[in-house]
Amino acid sequence: MKFYKHKRVSRNRISPLRREGLTELHRNISPDIITMENLQSFLSDLDIDDLIKYPEIEPLVEQIGQLHEINKNCILVTSGIDGGLKTVFEMCTADNDSVATYFPTYAMYKVYSEAYNVNLIDININGEDTKKEIYNAINKNISILFLPNPNLPVEFGLSQNDISNICVEARKKEVLVVVDEAYAMFGLDTVIPLMSKHDNLIIARTFSKAIGFPGIRLGYLIANSNLIEYLESRRNAHETNALSIAAGRWAINNFSIVKSNIDKVIETREWFKQELIKNNISAIGVYSNTVILDFYNKDMTDKFTEFMKDQGYIVKNNYPSMYHGFVSITIGTKDLMIRVMNSIKVFMELNNDKFK
């Protein structure tokens, strides 16, 4: 019909498995990282008057600035990282532009590329050779280079120095570099200190992953003030709601709780990896709240996924064919991961002949 002005974008709907009472270990959001006690603390601090007024974003912006020790004019609050990425695509690409990012990576890069009629160039992840592919992509007449750091579902991370060098080369080609730091607090140094050195750098952050508030849909972009002013120029005046703002402010005010939760996830991740290795399972996971198991066999990953579902857990195994043996499991509390590990041991015992 004539009122359909844009190409339809194909996208999988969220699975209804949550309604079956299964524990979700496939969304890269650590279960129970925010406790009921934390939520009660937030609700007790909530000012109901804020919900019957138009939202005031400025106090949250100031707190984010204080948290990262940057000027508030370098911050743009968004509706999760998704909202930040959408803003960048809308304001910094034109029809038939090209952008580049890793493959495989977060699905929304492909969704927004299709929605804004932008050509998406894949950067295949292949150890240290990945860096060469990044520089090759810069020379392919792209307008934006998206670098999830660390990347998932196949883990890859870059150092501050790596990204600084990439920004220098990208600036020569007038390429914008967007570093997605959704998982950075689990194991990588932030590149926020580089913002003042590179006028072509944007850092995207979220309250979903490490902080543990995916339901509030809150994130922010950090860049030089001129770039932030440009990105903000066509946005809805009240894009972020008052409840999300209140939750974000609570998280920053109680950042010691957030940091303690992150430390627990990292500690449990390392324990879980060692347990997997003891049981002769290849385990990958250095930078995020997720550990990747490699069974080297698609049939075995399918069998494992179904077994874990029967045990009450949803794990992720929908990887591209080149990673057909991969299964990823999000790290939760130590007690939860002990139960998960016990289920994995049962699976290994039942399939012992397959692993000899």
Image: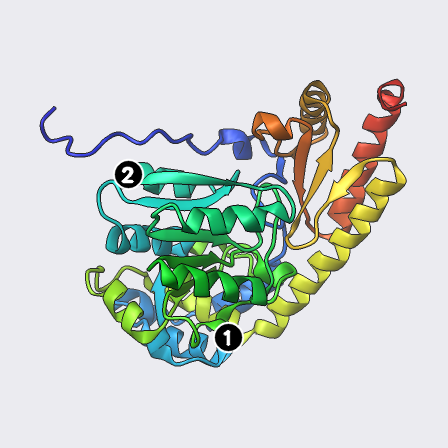
In the foreground, 169 or 51: 169
Where residue 24 sits in the image (x, y, percent)? 60, 39
Sequence-first tag of 2 and 1: 2
The residue positioned 20% from the left and 34% from the top of the image is 6
In the foreground, 318 or 136: 136
Q: Is residue 332 left or right of residue 112?
A: right
User: Which amino acid does the dot numbered 2 rest on?
Assistant: Ala
Q: In the image, which is nearer the foreground, mark 2 or mark 1?
A: 1
Q: Quadrant of residue 154?
A: top right
Q: Is residue 338 above or below residue 326?
A: below
Q: Quadrant of residue 197?
A: bottom left
Q: Secondary structure at mark 1?
A: helix
The residue positioned 72% from the left and 29% from the top of the image is 311
Mark 2–mark 1 Cα distance, whole angstroms, equals 32 Å
In the foreground, 228 or 216: 228
User: Which amino acid does the dot numbered 1 rest on?
Assistant: Pro
Q: Secondary structure at mark 2?
A: helix
Where residue 146 sits in the image (x, y, percent)? 43, 52
Badge number at residue 115: 2
